[in-house]
Image (tube, rainbow, N blue to C red):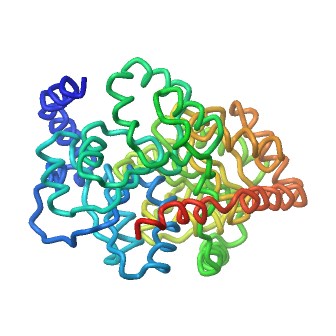
Amino acid sequence: MRFIYTCVFYFIIPFIVLRLLWRSIKAPSYRHRWYERFSIYNTKFPTGVVWFHAVSVGEAEALFPLLKQIKLKHPDTKLLITTTTPTGSVRVKAVMQDTVSHVYLPYDVPDAICRFMSCFKPRMAVMMETEIWPNIFNYCVDHHIPLYIINARLSEKSSKGYQKISGLIHPALANIKCIATQTIDDASRFISIGADSEKVKTLGNIKFDVEITSSTITEGLTIKADLFMDRFVWLIASTHKDEEKIFLDIYKVLKEKIPELLLILVPRHPERFPVVKKMIEKEHLSVAIRTSQETVNTKTDVYLVDTMGELKAMYAAADVAFIGGSMVAKGGHNILEASAIGVPVMFGPFMDNFKEIARVVLIENAAIQCQSKSDIISSMKLLYEQPDYRKELARKGKAFVQKNQGAIDRICAMLEQHF
């Protein structure tokens, strides 16, 4: 079945390239470095690397603390990080700089994989979360490269989909050294699609081991004091298409009850920054742009963060944070950074990507889930009117994160044998 998969992949490559070109109309970075996706390089890279793959920004952010711990313990280890998206690539370069090698993940076809492996000669391969690539996995097995999936998660929907192509997935999973899952449910689902139960371990979610430095908190508090004055700051993080309009409408209602309210919008994708700015202006709201260094005054309604890598500091500058991707069917985003920083957290009904985290955090009353606009309005009024409740929600959120930390140490210990 892998032969059929490979033939189909070769057939659709022209369409994948056309899709990259189409996406590059709004996000020019998609047309840059396309040759890396075919493992064509114009730079000489180190060999004998330990290779980690993180699809995009979320996976990369979760991976950074693990990479830093590995570098601390094994400073001579050469690390390679691959990503799939340009935004993930930007974060790897910004955070890890020249301490690691970085390229895009090659397409899962034999010639590109062979060039990639010949260039880097990895001595271990580590995939984040749900990445299953049959040809890459097969190459690792044939060439005795230890292969791991860490922070592994698998939804019920995905597991049912994989079960339909068991002839392709079973061999891909057969020789993995270990699948380190986030939860017991994830472990059960990986076993249901063909993973060896003896090689599946539940080691926890490394996203709980988020790094929050004192300098990040200081930066956020400075932004709040110097830039946001005495405004009540409501941050909406990682928003998607159709989501900003929801919060602009809610802002107009809340503004009548909370005159000092300031709405901060942080769109998930950089190519949408100009679109969101136009949307705000169309709603006849006053907007200040982060990169323009525009002053926030008493008449400013919205502060648009059109930069990458500043979200943690913005959380520290906020009085309340709402996690985007959860008011539209995008599956939600990571709530743990905001909770770890100590800001009260809200999120919407669509949290499929973080279902277990959402379930437990609500049981512990450490965040607020809102099902509708009216829910958001009433919850925001309550948080504004009751500062003690705000503090308690923030305290419980922070405790929730701290209680579930330790996955990085467990995963690092598992991988240690290959360093």
x, y percent for residue 168 = 32, 26
How many tags in the picture?
Answer: 0
x, y percent for residue 335 = 64, 51
Image point 12% across, 70% down: which residue? 43
Identify whether 196 is placed above or below 276: above
x, y percent for residue 165 = 36, 21
Residue 183 visible to the viewer: yes
Q: Report the front residue among 25 and 87.
A: 87
Identify whether 332 is placed above or below 264: above
**Quadrant hosting residue 42:** bottom left
Look at the image and tell me in which quarter the C terminus lies: bottom left
Q: Report the front residue among 307 and 87.
A: 87
x, y percent for residue 54 = 40, 53
Image point 82% across, 51% down: which residue? 383
Identify whether 128 is placed above or below 161: below
**Quadrant hosting residue 18:** top left
Image point 72% across, 70% down: which residue? 230
Look at the image and tell me in which quarter the N terminus lies: top left
**Quadrant hosting residue 25:** top left
Q: With 297 as the anchor, is 104 left or right in this view?
A: left
Residue 273 visible to the viewer: no
